Image (tube, helix red, strand yellow):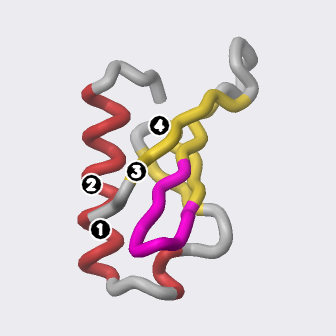
Amino acid sequence: MFENIEVTQMFEGQVHERQQFTVNIQGSDYTGIFHDGEIHWFNPHPKNKLEEQHISSVESKVHDLLMNHHIKD
């Protein structure tokens, strides 16, 4: 599905603290923010190259990974 995922904190310790993540899908890096249980993609959005079903599957895996590793949203 995706080759790796990197998670970093944005605005750590501030009101607008968020988790930023980068995933490599089929050789392309895509970045987004995870907040309030939702994924918000930066540009380029994976929908430009991937089918909706594949994107939904990736989002599900990213969501599960972030929630199961006790990373607060």
How dense is the environment of label 1, judged by Cα within 10 Å: few (below 14), some, or many (20 and up)? few
How far apart are the two marked residues, 1 and 4, measured between alpha carbons? 17 Å
- Check disc 1 and report the residue beneath it: 56
User: How far across and down, in percent of the image, does residue 39 sit?
Assistant: 47, 52
Of residues 53 and 26, the one drawn nearer to the viewer in this rendering: 26
- Check disc 4 and report the residue beneath it: 36
Of residues 27 and 19, the one drawn nearer to the viewer in this rendering: 27
Question: At 42% from the left edge and 23% from the top edge, which residue is drawn?
Answer: 71
* Amino acid type, mark 1: Ser
* Amino acid type, mark 3: Asn
How far apart are the two marked residues, 1 and 2, measured between alpha carbons? 6 Å
* Amino acid type, mark 4: Asp
| Magenta-drawn segment | 22-30
Earlier in the chain: of badge 1 and badge 4, it is 4
- Check disc 2 and report the residue beneath it: 60
How dense is the environment of label 3, judged by Cα within 10 Å: few (below 14), some, or many (20 and up)? few
Earlier in the chain: of badge 1 and badge 3, it is 3
Question: At 40% from the left edge and 74% from the top edge, which residue is drawn?
Answer: 26
Q: Is residue 38 in the magenta section? A: no
User: How far across and down, in percent of the image, does residue 68 sit?
Assistant: 26, 28
Is there a contact, CB below 8 Å, between mark 1 and mark 2? yes
Circle 4 or circle 3, nearest the eye: 3
- Check disc 3 and report the residue beneath it: 4
The answer to whether residue 65 is above or below residue 47 is above
How far apart are the two marked residues, 4 and 3, measured between alpha carbons? 23 Å
How dense is the environment of label 2, judged by Cα within 10 Å: few (below 14), some, or many (20 and up)? few
